[in-house]
Amino acid sequence: PEEWILYAKQHHFRKVPSRKLEVCPDCYSRNREKLGQFIYYSNLICLYECRGCGLVYTDTISEHSTIEKHFEGAYKDECYFNAMRKYVFEEISDLVKQLAPTGGDVLDVGGAKGHLLEMVGEGRPDLRRGLNDLSSIACQWASSHYQLKVYCGRFTACEFRQTFDVITMIDVIYYEPDLHMLWDRAASLVNDEGYLIVRVPNKIALIRVYLKLFSMIFRSRRDLQAVIKFLNPEHIYVFSRKYLRQRLAPLGFEAVIFLPSAVLARRPWIRWIYKLWYQIAQLVHLGSLGRFIITPSLTVVARRKKKTK
């Protein structure tokens, strides 16, 4: 512990309530392998890989009030939604408009202020659109500006009196502490032959390479590792395609496909580069028969099979 004192002083450590996970948050297995560690919110957090289901997860969950406070202040900027996430929303809204049946029901989980659903409604006014978000500020905006039906609160705790033809979970599932319940809830709310669309980072290979190199080069300093490159410290999980495919299959989803996802336009003055990168990624994905996805994130489209009587 003494070796951390200077680091703690330099970074103004303070006590942040949290809890440690002793088992995998999905399959509840205790059999796991430590991959690395990092510091976030004054906590030393370990990154593990479950040897049961293959989920890569962090072992520290911040107190709910800390998470709620974070999301009330983060990701509310109109520029972030209208500019940076423009291409992402265009990609996902096109998918929803293609897959949703006439007069269908759509739910956007973690939909923030409703910009994605508004884009969907512009092309498909026949769709009934619902939004779920943890932030009350975001839900109020979505309701008042876009007249969307809102379900405010954690997705796993909200009460839904219907099922949906398409559910989207765009850049949100890695925040849900109870991942097992999230998967079960999503599956129960998707209609037969309906679709689940998920967007997650596509960086697990980069994280593995970085951790391998760190372990080789800084073997004697592994206990003082404070950063994992390519890992967003806010995220509880890192998803692989293998894990996602195996997890969705027993929930009744078939024909699970993975697609390159549009890139966030972080620098507006070079948006053409982001667009070109996405087009190249689509060609690489097509040319490799779906094996290679070179965008920082990927989109998962899973169709729920029809139940046989």
Image (cartoon, rainbow, N blue to C red):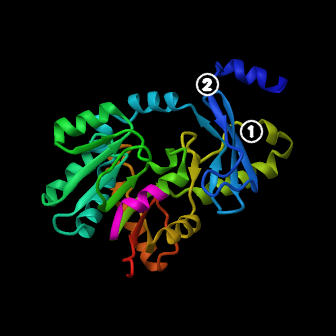
* 116 to the left or right of 224: left
Give the quadrant of the N terminus.
top right
How far across and how far down the image is residue 266, in percent? 39, 44
- Mark 2 or mark 1, whichever is nearer to me: 2
Most extreme residue toward the right is: 220
**Secondary structure state at the residue bearing disc 2:** loop
Q: Which residue is mark 1?
A: 225
Would you say the magenta stretch is mainly helix, strand or loop? helix
Structural distance between the alpha carbons of marks 2 and 1 = 20 Å
Query: What residue is shown at x 30% (from left), y 54% (from top)?
Result: 107
How far across and how far down the image is residue 197, in percent? 38, 61
Along the line of sight, the residue nearer the viewer: 151 or 226: 151
Three-letter amino acid code at the position of disc 1? Gln
Q: Which residue is mark 2?
A: 16
* Label at residue 293: none
Seen in the picture, residue 139 relative to 253 is either above or below; the reply is above
Q: Is residue 191 magenta?
A: yes
Query: What residue is shown at x 24% (from left), y 66% (from top)?
Result: 100
Three-letter amino acid code at the position of disc 2? Val
Residue 230 can be seen, yes or no: yes
**Secondary structure state at the residue bearing disc 1:** loop
